[in-house]
Image: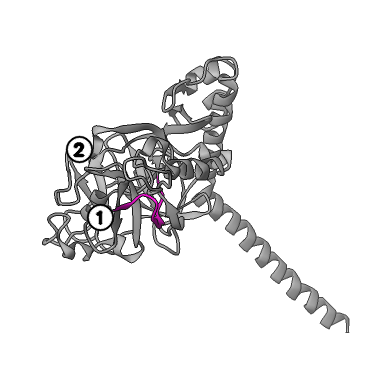
Amino acid sequence: MSSNLGSLIKKYAVILIVIVIVVIGGMFLYKLIFGSEIAYNKIEDLMVSGAQKYFRNRDLPTDNGEVKVVTINSLVETGNMKPMSKLTKDTCEGKVSVRKNGSQYLYLPSLDCENHKTKTMFSVLINEDTIVTKADGVYQMGDEYVYRGEKVKNYVSFGSRIWRIIKIDDEGIMKLISTTAEEKEAVWDNRYNVDVKERLGINDFSVSRIKDRLNSIYNGMSNKNKKHLIAKSVCVGSRNTKNKSLNSGTECSETIADLHISLPNIKDRIVASIDENCKDLSTTSCVNYNYFTSFFSSSYTTLKAEGNSHQVIYINSITGLYKSDANEEREIFLVVHIDSNELYSSGNGTWDNPYVIK
């Protein structure tokens, strides 16, 4: 009996030792693979908290879109952060950029070490593996990076919505469009128009119902989401629907400044196609090899129709642009802008695993 008990004890002792070895080995391996990255992420968090303390006694940016920068050295010298030598054995330098977005402030750390560099959305999206010259992917067009083709990995999860990246402009700003219509029956404007003596609406975007609606959507967002949205100047001029060129020359004759949420334009939908026959707004084949075709139906734009005071421009999923009375009910898709220097959190840009901003 005692012999069997002894054997049983030895058996469980061996099993226990094996388990302990596996656990310790696993912990060592995890630390080896992920430990350094976690440490660097914590340093980036310390940089942000240090910058927030730093700017309690200094002027933050005052104008919409204005950016101020503080270096790690300044944070250390002012006692708002520990010296890097106490945080890591690596050789590092870095800074925190503070951007004023509306009434909110966005703090973006940038840490550059021998063994680590802050992973931003731009560094994940734009590199030698993602830029293409044919087929689906990111195309460099001048100083911009534009998503084109049918099966492109440009999904982003943000603010309880799924978006698609249209492009990154020459200022490093990502332009996103919502993948579902925000409204199915939106009215551009429904005021009484003295020119036609009916309530057909007035096609002045600056005082329109649609501008009020877009601002209402923005105001309904949490401050956590608002701080990411960059206010942009939006073209609200006129367009002649008979003009099939991508650039009419009149669309930006009038602009509205500091709009946080806007509406899509026809050029983005057309340029997204890589069909060689897609030349202008009159080409139906622009629906081919175009990711817009998979989700976009139709939407009002911010433009007025040329030649009258009551009609506005909308675009559809097939091709071209059209005009309608401003009081007609139509869909709207949302467009927002986010800094591509935002920190990357996770995702590979697919519908099932969209990019997530930290």
Which type of secondary structure does the marked residue at label 2 adopt? loop
Apparent side of residue 346 relative to residue 195 in the rendered image (left or right)? right
Q: Earlier in the sequence, mark 1 or mark 2?
A: 2
Residue 84, placed above or below residue 228: above
Q: Residue pushed farthest bottom? A: 1
Looking at the image, residue 90 lies above or below residue 320: above
- Residue drawn where x is 54% and y is 34% of the image: 43
Q: Tell me residue 337's x, y (percent).
A: 39, 41
> At which x and y percent is residue 86?
57, 27
Locate residue 272: give its quadrant: bottom left
| Of 278 and 141, the residue lying toward us | 278
Residue 250, disc? 2
117 magenta-colored: no
The N terminus lies in which quarter of the figure? bottom right
Task: Look at mark 1 in the image and give the residue it sits on.
Answer: 322
Kind of residue at disc 2: Thr
Where are the magenta residues, as a range?
324-335
Give the residue drawn at x 19%, y 46%: 240
Q: Residue at x 45, y 58 (%)?
A: 185
Residue 174 showing in the rendered view: yes
Q: Nearer the viewer, residue 241 or 74?
A: 241
Residue 115 location, quadrant: top left
Image location of residue 305, percent across then percent down = 26, 46
Q: Which sits in the foreground, 121 or 113? A: 121
- The amino acid at mark 1 is Tyr
